Amino acid sequence: MKKFSLILAFIFILIGGCACCAPQPQINENPIKNVIILIGDGMGFNHIKNTSLYCDIDNFEFESNFFSDVTTYSLNQEITDSAAAATALATGHKVYNYEVGMHKVYGEEEGVKYENIMEVAQKYGKKTGIFTSDALEGATPASFSSHVEDRGDNYEILYDQAYNSGIDLFVASQGSSIYEENKDLFENNNYKQLETLEDLENLEKNEKGIAVFNNLCSYYDENEKNVTNFNTALTYTLNYLDNENGFCLMIENAWIDKRSHNNKLNSAMCEVRMFADTIKLLKEFCKDRTDTSVFITADHETGGLQLAKTKDQLTNSLYTRTGHSAANVPLYTINVPFEKRVTVNNTDIFAMMKTLMTGNKYFE
Ligand SMILES: [Zn+2]
């Protein structure tokens, strides 16, 4: 009798539990379980090449992984802002500048909200995370976790993140006071407030968390004090997210853009140098496994940065503007099984991530 019930239980497990349970996640036969996108905000080719010269490093973690270059124009502007660019990466749709995860035609009442890669991942039972050195409501993290008409709608972004995004873990940098004023949105929706790196390290897998750290910028920048170690926080984030159903994680270094808006080359290069450490960390994470794909790119180039030929030429005067430019940006990949291209659209990166995550061909 005991044997019979054991067999029954075995058959029960085989057919996947009972029909009255919560909807089962969809199954992907694809060997890729985890998808990570690492974004250097404002990081053009010359930011990388100049930093490589500055640090005396030949390969510098980038070149061996080069996949293609990437267009960045938005639906209405040759030069994109971070919201339209991140929306293209997150949803596969080019939208107007300043739109976040949605598009509204001028004059129409209602806009269309586009499904983002985190929402795709959640349908497949995956954990999801947003990790940024920008404020939580910044345009890049917002585009992966909210749908609002304008990147300036800060409260609406935070509300969407807390109540509708389904994101398991947010890690961000201290920005304006808007987060402090509204942190109860997250508390009310069962996010555990993580005050220290240790809190992040100890977050249980069955809990949701939010960490807003001080000064999550480059530890190479001597002008910055009391820096929270970006890559240590990222290591704890990867440990938390790693699970048998897989995960999707967006990581952003926001300071390459901010330093370049101010034409501060040395500080921008410190950020690119730390970005290279982040790539090294992700390579290490992928080393003994074949189930994780990493996309490394930028949303756009900032500063119209020129290329230095010698170290002496590495001065702020290499910048030709204080805004973004229309230049294409690089795409690097780790364990992405598509053939290399000359150029892809930023929207193709979403298509590649979705193809790997679902096993359906959105990109071939
Ligand atoms: Zn910018």
Image (cartoon, grey):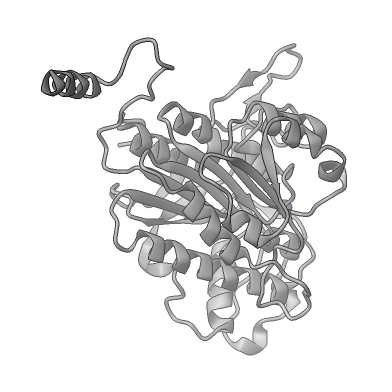
User: On the rendered structure, is 138 left or right of 130?
Assistant: right
Q: Residue at left 67%, top 17%?
A: 111
Using the image as rendered, state which of residue 215 and residue 322 is in the foreground.
215
User: On the rendered structure, is 242 left or right of 237?
Assistant: left
Using the image as rendered, state which of residue 71 and residue 141 is in the foreground.
141
Using the image as rendered, state which of residue 76 and residue 99 is in the foreground.
99
Q: Residue at left 60%, top 38%?
A: 144
Among the 4 quarters of the image, the one containing residue 310 = bottom right
Q: Position of residue 266 (x, y in %)?
A: 70, 77
Using the image as rendered, state which of residue 53 and residue 114 is in the foreground.
114
- Numbered disc total: 0
Q: Is residue 266 above or below residue 152?
A: below
User: On the rendered structure, is 109 left or right of 72?
Assistant: right
Residue with the most extreme front position: 1
Q: Position of residue 164 (x, y in %)?
A: 64, 26
Q: Residue at left 76%, top 68%?
A: 263
Q: Position of residue 154 (x, y in %)?
A: 80, 36
Q: Is residue 63 visible?
A: yes
Q: Position of residue 219 (x, y in %)?
A: 66, 74
Q: Quadrant of the N terminus?
A: top left
Q: Is residue 254 above or below residue 305?
A: above
Q: Is residue 81 visible?
A: no
Q: Is residue 144 above or below residue 51?
A: above
Among the 4 quarters of the image, the one containing residue 359 = top left
Q: Quadrant of the C terminus?
A: top left
